[in-house]
Image (tube, grey):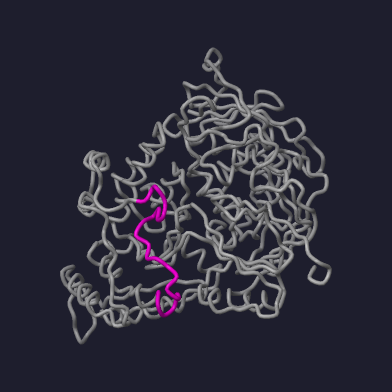
Amino acid sequence: MIVAAQNKPRHRLGRWLVICMILITPACRQDTAGSLAISQGDGQTQAAASQEFLATLSADTLGVERKNSHINQQTITQTTLSINNTAKYSTATHLPYANPDAPKGGVLSMPAIGMFNSLNGFIDTGIAATGTFYLYDTLMAGSLDEVGVLYPQLAEKVTFSPNDDSWIIYHINPKARFWDGSPVTAHDVQATYQAILSKGLMSWRAFLSGIVAVEVLDDYRVKFYFNPSSAGDLQSTVGLMPIFAKKDIITRFDKVSLEPLMGSGAYRLQLAEPSRRVRYVRDDAYWGRDLMVNRGRFNFDAIEYVYFADEAVAFEAFKAGAYRFRIENDIKRWATFLPKNQPINKVTIKNTNPVLMRGLVMNLRKPLFADIRVRRAMNLAFDFQWSNQQLLFGEYQRLNSYFYGSPLQAVGKPDAKEHEVLLSLPLNNDEKSALDGVPVQPVSTGDGINRANLLAAKSLLQQAGFVYQNGWLYDKTGKQLSVEILVADDKYQAILLPYLNNLKRLGLQAKLKRLDKASYINRKRQYDFDMIIDEFMQGNAPGAEQSYLWGSQSARQVGNQNTIGIQSAAIDELIVRLVQADNREQIVLYTKVLDRLLLAGEYMVAWYGKNSTDVMYYQGYQHPEKLPSAAIGLDYWWYHAPDEVKK
């Protein structure tokens, strides 16, 4: 249930972070775009499919007949959605981290790694270019320093019932226009959701599966109906999906193409050179430039992503001026690079989000990792203390939470409420350890030998039934124990090679296998790996998106995000409670318990992180004095520099 600003907040914006991951960073998370293997089919089949698709879009509702049961309900119509929070800027002229007087001009150029062959990042075929989110508006827009607050964008207001969260009506702004000048209508919204739910990314279909129907009330009002079990979360989520023009959806939604679907966003495509560069140019006729959320936003004349084979090549190109702005994730480059006479700034920007959980995922679909003692041994083999001092300049902390550095992080032993929730869940044997507290990450002397931890790991492997012969491990059938870590580049080779050596010292045949990007994506989507490097982004308002990260159904769906393969009745039930939570206190409680269960399973060799972002950029890029608390707010930066440094 969405609540009026004056009432007690209830719902959250859990899925928005998932949408951000897919839309904002498609190059970094290209697995969501699927494989390069595309089945074109014959012409007649394609034509028949198009006709069938067209027929489904001509109906007024999606999936069910019109419903009239809500006519007599008490309703509220307002311009903002307050989700577990109170909207702070409902009467503001612009957001506090925006400069409405920022100059327009310049080019924001950034790197992208890998390749692309499409501008369609919304289906499970092709590899989408980075930055396609600039092409599309959403019904509402989120705030970067509030948890779960939405403001008008394509929709100028919403109508809902304070007592029934199984539906919501979005009122489309009659001024909203696509690039060709045609109006954005409720028919476009309905067609967008029909396409996503029938042909879109599998991960999107999963977290939007609670949509029961989408009904066109008139040209500028669209009503969503939801399954009550996931309704509260979805009421806001549907306001944060990109909206496409119906006429393009009918003919091109499921096509891999370098021509983007018609959008209404602030930027349009200027050029796309596959695997070389993609450039978006600001639309001077953009209909929404004067909306509160957009004042002082979209200040660059153009935004360009330049493609490189790997991070090392990209960094050298940055120093040579091939592009002008980069987020630096390599601590060695960050610590050792001195601009000297180059007009380059180095800035660390802090944020309040949970630290990104990154590390080595163990695929539970493989029999080797079914035993928690094996997973624990794999974690003991990672010598963080040595890596941090020798490779990471002592700048990082070892992660021991999926919500590290936030109020959602589980710490120590469970308190009384957490303990009560744990006891009410159908815990498996591995998860029962959550009752005793959060597992402590192993600590070494940092000498690079890691003797004590490797001895402990060896003992665990023997307890799990493996035996040593000539220094190598074998299972009961006489098969030698081996593990393969799958990678798509050499980005983390310095971290991985010492770890591989430790695994070999334990008696495992351990190897690193590098694949081209397309092959890597395909194998990851098919869960065809022993271990991979993966990351799990979290926000301050988790919700039903947790089901596709950790849910049993997601583990069985090819191409979804449960790469670990977790299938836990306790976690499934807990996610349902999280989705249905009535207030912020319950959300924090259930999230902490979820954190405890994930940690108890010891599913990852968690790596390291920090609550900040390191950026490098050439002089000329500027930002407001106040930055948002949850992001670097790049949409609100601008370009202004003396002639001699302009480029």
Report the front residue among 410 and 343. 343
Quadrant hosting residue 618: bottom right
Image side of residue 523 versus residue 116, left or right: left
Image side of residue 34 versus residue 621, left or right: left
Report the front residue among 467 and 597. 597
Counting labels gives 0
- Percent from the top left, x then y, of residue 359? 41, 65
315 within the magenta span: no
- Percent from the top left, x then y, of residue 595? 34, 50
Residue 476 visible (yes or no): no
Quadrant hosting residue 37: bottom right
Residue farthest toward the front in the current orientation of the protein: 625
- The C terminus lies in quadrant: bottom right
Q: Is residue 551 above or below residue 27?
A: above
Which range is magenta? 388-409
Image side of residue 180 versus residue 556, left or right: right
Name the residue rendered at 51%, 31% in the picture: 212
Q: Main secondary structure of the magenta part?
A: loop
- Percent from the top left, x then y, of residue 628? 59, 50
Residue 319 visible (yes or no): yes
